[in-house]
Image (spheres, grey):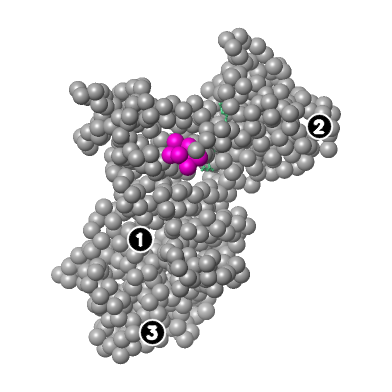
Amino acid sequence: MNFQSKKIVVVGGVAGGASFAARMRRLDESANIVMFERGEYISFANCGLPYHIGGDISQRSQLILQTPESFNTRFNVDVRTKTEVIGVNTSRKCVTFVSNGSVSEEDYDYLILSPGALPVVPATEGVGNHRVFTLRTIPDTDKIIRFIQNGNIGDALVVGGGFIGLEMAENLRQRGLEVTLVEASDQLFSPMDPEMAYTVNQHLKANGVKVILGDSVQSFSETENGKFAALLQSGTAVKTSLVILAIGVRPDTQFLSGSGIRTNSRGAIIVNDQLQTNVEQVFALGDAVEITQLVSGARVTIPLAGPANRQGRIVADNIAGFDSKYRGTQATSICKMFDLTAAVTGLNEKTAKAAELQFLKSYTHSANHASYYPGASLMSVKLIFSPEDGVILGGQVTGKEGVDKRVDLLATAVRNRLTIYDLADSELAYAPPYGSAKDPLNIAGFVAQNILNHISPVCYSEQVKHLFQNGYQILDVRTKREFGHGRIEGALNIPIDELRNRLNELDGKRPVLVYCQVGLRGHLGVRILLQNRFRAVNLSGGYKTYKAYQESLGKESIITLKTTEKKTEPVIINACGLQCPQPVNKLGEAIGEAEEGEIVEILANDQAFASNLSSWCAKTGNLLISLAAEKGVYNAAVQKRTVTKESGSEERK
Ligand code: FAD
């Protein structure tokens, strides 16, 4: 360790900057640390701002975790608030700053950049109107609260369905305002996949928020009666008194132009795994940097408080002489919307596809704690995992209670490359008020294990129509009553408890797509069918996920699969007795002759078949719909697909 006195200049005094300075001081009593902050406050709770507007955090002072004085007393840091750094000269190792209107310079041995991000403000007509606000700082919060109080405001428009927009929608509602939320894409909370985020949409509506998806603001204008309106692309005019713009952020790095410090095309500072920029002794962290997505390895910006704080420690460690590396951000985030919580970690389908990773997924819906203990509620878990070894690539959880601990466990699993087998094997704290002897995450692990081990092959909501058209019969194993309340049209209803005695009602020549409400009875149905020589797949997540999927596409939950539609018998190849690679070669020939979207089934009993098949599908882009193993015989269904590659980088709103 090097304890020589060094001069360290920090730009930005909130999450990353203050974390860095505090850790630096703990490691080096002799360092001369100067922290510049453009605003009036340092180390304030920006994540708490929406809750102060809504009133849950009643005292403004609760948002201010340290004052410049208290920070200086505790950490001996020269804090300069209301001081903006306007330039960096890396050859002379000094920064230029403005304070009270006068320009001065400060030299440094080490420069730490944690300037954060600025809300994106589009060049929309009328965006400069006094009724349009963004939220990043305490003064922004003050302005919004004052405007609501003084203007006797009764309604608001939130633009953007990311976590700040969602939190603002809730908190403005909590203040008694009528709230409309408009989001340009087709879903809210983009870190989640649409069918999971659909619950968020429904919940907002149930709590009185009007949600408009797939539309965006074209202009803002005053209307005759002293009101204000946002004109949307669709032609809809939303009358409102107050607008909160929450459409994302961009790195606040303009002041670095000409400094030689490398940034990407969006202005994010490029750093290595020690968070060092291309210029020696200049480090950067927080919302302003481009980092590595932990799971996919993609270079992305993911503006979150946890990474900024941890990066602050890492930079301090490196300057103090410890070798400390930032392994990447996995984008763990959580959002409260009234009494619903939605949380994610790692990759979702979009980011996994962009990274060209093969993945399987599972949906499970289980009670958050023992269902006989009062207050249990349903929790939905989606896992994304590797088809090779079951490594968990990402997880998404929604529910009313206990979502936070489940997502944190998944976050730990993703960070440490744990598998679905580890999840199934996790020994988690259990007593009836907190969980179940089989925790929702154990269950998610069991289900994923059954998929990966080919014990219970599944299909997904987006495949239902295709499978039906390819000759699958659809079997609903719920009760008559449930069936009557909503179903996949064209399904035959045989309640699970009657299935064993009514197998003769099914066509033994055609494969069966089984579903129930959440997937459990469907799994039982598939096990019964497979052991009775049927080919069968379970609809992952059941009708609940299917309905959310359909509705997230803006479609009716009951799709009509007309019996008159063209249905083809699947091509079946019997490759039993053949050794690998022959079964896969035979499959390749059949797929070669099949039409796009057609399904080919194959039976094989060579043990190497399963892994050969997965990698063949991964390589050729054909879709492995199901793979079941029963009494030593594999039964696989593969859909002909021509590969289309998606690319792009992840951006968190
Ligand atoms: P900041 O904390 O923003 O600090 C940057 C500071 O640098 C700013 O105060 C700025 O004034 C100052 N600065 C910039 N340029 C200069 C300059 N040239 N000279 C001097 N000073 C400068 N994240 C979560 O993980 N969970 C949440 O629940 C969550 N909620 C949020 C809610 C809101 C309303 C907001 C706005 C953000 C929220 N975030 C949340 C994001 C989180 O606050 C940020 O990721 C985190 O603060 C980033 O830390 P940072 O140090 O990079 O930037």
Q: Would residue 382 appear left or right of 32 to someone viewing this image?
A: left
Residue 504 seen in the current view = yes
* Residue annotated with mark 1: 641
Q: Secondary structure at mark 3?
A: helix
Distance between the alpha carbons at the discs numbered 1 and 3: 30 Å
Q: Would residue 159 appear left or right of 256 to someone viewing this image?
A: left
Q: The disc labelled 2 sits on which kind of residue?
A: Glu
Please tell me which residue is depicted at 64% across the width and 28% down the height of the picture. 67
N-term mark: 2 or 3 = 2
Disc 2 residue: CB within 8 Å of ligand 1: no
Distance between the alpha carbons at the discs numbered 2 and 3: 70 Å
* Residue annotated with mark 2: 29
Q: Which residues are magenta?
A: 51-57
Please tell me which residue is depicted at 39% across the width and 71% down the height of the picture. 519
Disc 3 residue: CB within 8 Å of ligand 1: no
Q: Is residue 362 above or below residue 456?
A: above
Q: Is residue 160 above or below residue 123?
A: below
